[in-house]
Amino acid sequence: MKIITPVFYKNFKCIASACPDSCCQGWEVDVDKSTLEYYKALTGGLHERIESVLDKDEFENDIFRLADKKRCPFLNCENLCDIHIAIGGEHTPYTCKTFPRFINDFGGTRELGISFSCPVASDMMWELEEDFSFSQELNSDLPALNDIDAELYFTLLSERKKAYEIILDKTKPFNVRMVALLESAKELQKKLDDYEEGSNEIDFISVFNNPEIINKEWEEKVCNARFDIAVINSKPCENIAMYFLFRYYMQAVYDKDVLSKAKMAAVGVLIPAFFGNDSWTIHLWSKETEHSDVNMDRYKKLLKSADCLCSENLIKYFK
């Protein structure tokens, strides 16, 4: 299998108890089936403690019931994981083992990245001075079974490479590159599938009023939003656009909706311009949105239905 990662991917290291916004606090902890089976085979005090906090969410998924202040019940007073300490990190739930990494499989290719939802990862990508580029290697894993349309996949692969080139073209101001990205995605979308942009009259700021609140600090940032166009022509915004293209663009192979993926990159760039020109702000947005099924589902629908997020209105911010 071919493995593709950003060049900085292997440099990421969790800072555990020193983290300013623990991933073990604020959201539910899903317990995957294989890990749950391992826990059920345990004996003694840890087994009893795990059993006492196991619960189901509204979708009947197994989760740990959160403690006060939405803390994982195994996050101790030193902000370390008691399960990790007792039986090793390899026996924590899959989400815990992989966070903040994301994995996208496309048959014989696996793409791995790190998410802005982690403050350390956010700092790494925000402060990246060189181009946001990628490395690849081969391992012995067999290709994953899939029903991907091969022709569409290779078309999108080629188009994403062009999108990267647009974003990294230093001969043009970054705002001009963003306009070119959106216009290119609009033309590609016409070839792939019908795309009717919506007329929902929600205003731009209200897009970010998520129904599920993970950190009230994000609410405060939304309330105090103020657009600063000067923020857009910056290296961190270039890095943000590349992150979104890498993480989401190829998912159009499943829904033929490439324009929404380009819009995500545009909105991502606008987040520091509206809510705060620092890595903490994009971290808060990512934790609130990319890691909440409720918030992310709403956001994806708004990308198509909200008039304020139609391509022409997004382009206006970059003029």
Image (cartoon, rainbow, N blue to C red):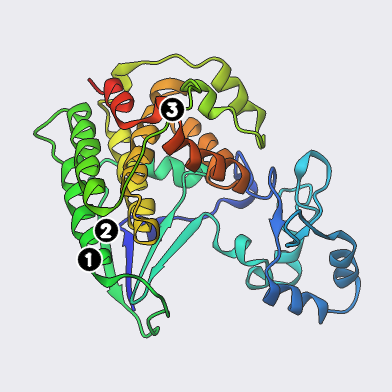
Residue 219, compared with residue 298, is above or below; it is: above
Mark 2, other Cα within 10 Å: few <14 / some 14–19 / many ≥20: some
Tell whether label 1 touches label 2 (CB within 8 Å): no
Q: Position of residue 214 (x, y in %)?
A: 66, 37
Mark earlier in primary sequence (2, 1)? 2
Q: Nearer the viewer, mark 2 or mark 1?
A: 1
- The residue where tag 3 is placed is 199
Q: Where is residue 37 in the image (x, y as percent from the top left)?
A: 75, 78
Mark 3, other Cα within 10 Å: few <14 / some 14–19 / many ≥20: few
- The residue where tag 2 is placed is 134
Separation of marks 3 and 2 at Cα, in angstroms:
38 Å
Of residue 170 and residue 227, the one placed in the foreground of this image is 227
Three-letter code for the amino acid on which mark 1 is drawn: Phe
Three-letter code for the amino acid on which mark 2 is drawn: Phe
Separation of marks 2 and 1 at Cα, in angstroms:
18 Å
Q: Which of marks 3 and 1 is in front?
A: 3
Residue 272, compared with residue 69, is above or below; it is: above
Which quadrant of the figure contains the N terminus?
A: bottom left
Q: Which residue is drawn at 31% across and 42% down?
A: 262
- The residue where tag 1 is placed is 154
Separation of marks 3 and 1 at Cα, in angstroms:
33 Å
Residue 59, compared with residue 270, is above or below; it is: below
